[in-house]
Image (tube, rainbow, N blue to C red):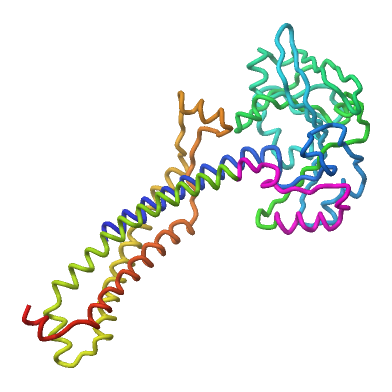
Amino acid sequence: MASILFAVLFASFMEALQKGAWNNMIKNVVNYYFGYAQIHQQGYWEEQSIDKAFDLSDSLNNLNQAVPAISAVLPRLESFALASTGNRTMGVLVVGIDPARENQMTNLKDRLTKGTYLEKDDKAVLIADGIAENLQLSLGDTLVLISQGYHGINAAGKYPIVGFVHFGSPELNKQMVYLPINEAQWFYGADGLVTSLALKIDDQDAIGKTVRAVKARLPAEKYEVMDWQELLPDLVQAKELDSAGNYIVYFILYMIIAFGIFGTILMMTKEREYEFGVLISIGMRRMKLAFVVWLEVLMLGLLGALAGILVSIPIVGYFHRNPLRFSGEYAQSMEKFGFEPIFPTEFNVRIFAMQAVIVVLITSVLALYPLWKMKRLKPVEAMRD
């Protein structure tokens, strides 16, 4: 029972930690900016060029009225620019947004660390903390932006900084500059155009169905509709690779537990051969006796799994409320790969139940050994030995 308890505990904690860390990262990267689905002009995602901007028609702008699963449509005009102040410069991603709609999905206003949020008619910028740190900027300073606009026109402008925002993803925190979309369209010479529409989908289970519904409404030769897994394939592959590594660890853990349980069953069966021989000799059917022994082992497994769940719940719950926070060189190395150095556990009853079910299944399969032993048992030899 103790070995089964610790098996359920270790496996549950490992899976909860892995899923919690990845869900936190996906939330940082996907929910904080990309959204769970986007619409572009066909071929835009491959080139990432402002020349692939398209007209924001009413049918696209009001797509949430046609597809109920979409709660909001966020128009964006995105392109890279050189940001400068004094003698310091760095490359940034300038994003033209509708401030109200953007806040509706990404809660951008809640991530303000200083200053005020953008208004629709502002001629000012909102910048990420990482840019402010690199360029040594303060509220009210002027940020100079230089870029190439729509179809090669010159794009240049000076904007006061009204606020700083902080992202959980270090990568986003070092490159994001926000302009009201009307000002961004003027800056890039792309009046009435957008490069992408981010779709706010509240029900994650409905993402695939929603993307298919949007594709059915739009001409495939003109628009591409992509979910977050297509937008961020590297993130999906990294998650799958990490999950595969965990499966190897799970396999080794379960093999160790299986040998421990099997050793117990083997020893129990051998020590009770005399009793088994007596019961068979006085008329008890072999299969009935084997079934009784199988039930004994299964009950042992169930009790161990239940105890494992009861021990796992408070431990996983504690680290769900108080996530592991890393610092120093390890945290810096994680940030380089785009990970926020925070590991919360995922508190999900399915995690505990699944680990318990796996352990019980292993136990029940190994408990078939007594059935094989009963079938071959010779009562006289068993009692004599």
Q: Is residue 359 magenta?
A: no
- Magenta stretch bounds: 207-236
**Residue 152 at x, y percent in the picture:** 90, 24
Q: Which residue lies at the image location 51% right of the left edge and 45% below the top edge?
A: 20
Look at the image and tell me in which quarter the N terminus lies: bottom left
Q: Residue 371 appears in which quarter of the rendering?
A: bottom left
The answer to which of 7 and 138 lies nearer the viewer is 7
Q: Residue 234 appears in which quarter of the rendering?
A: top right
**Residue 328 at x, y percent in the picture:** 45, 24
Q: Which residue lies at the image location 85% right of the left edge and 17% below the top edge?
A: 157
In the picture as drawn, the residue positioned furthest to the left comes out as 384
In the picture as drawn, the residue positioned furthest to the top comes out as 87
**Residue 64 at x, y percent in the picture:** 82, 52
**Residue 13 falls left or right of residue 226:** left
**Residue 45 falls left or right of residue 182:** left
What main secondary structure does the magenta stretch of the protein show?
Answer: helix
The answer to which of 8 and 178 lies nearer the viewer is 8
Q: Residue 46 appears in which quarter of the rendering?
A: top right
Look at the image and tell me in which quarter the C terminus lies: bottom left
Q: Is residue 226 magenta?
A: yes
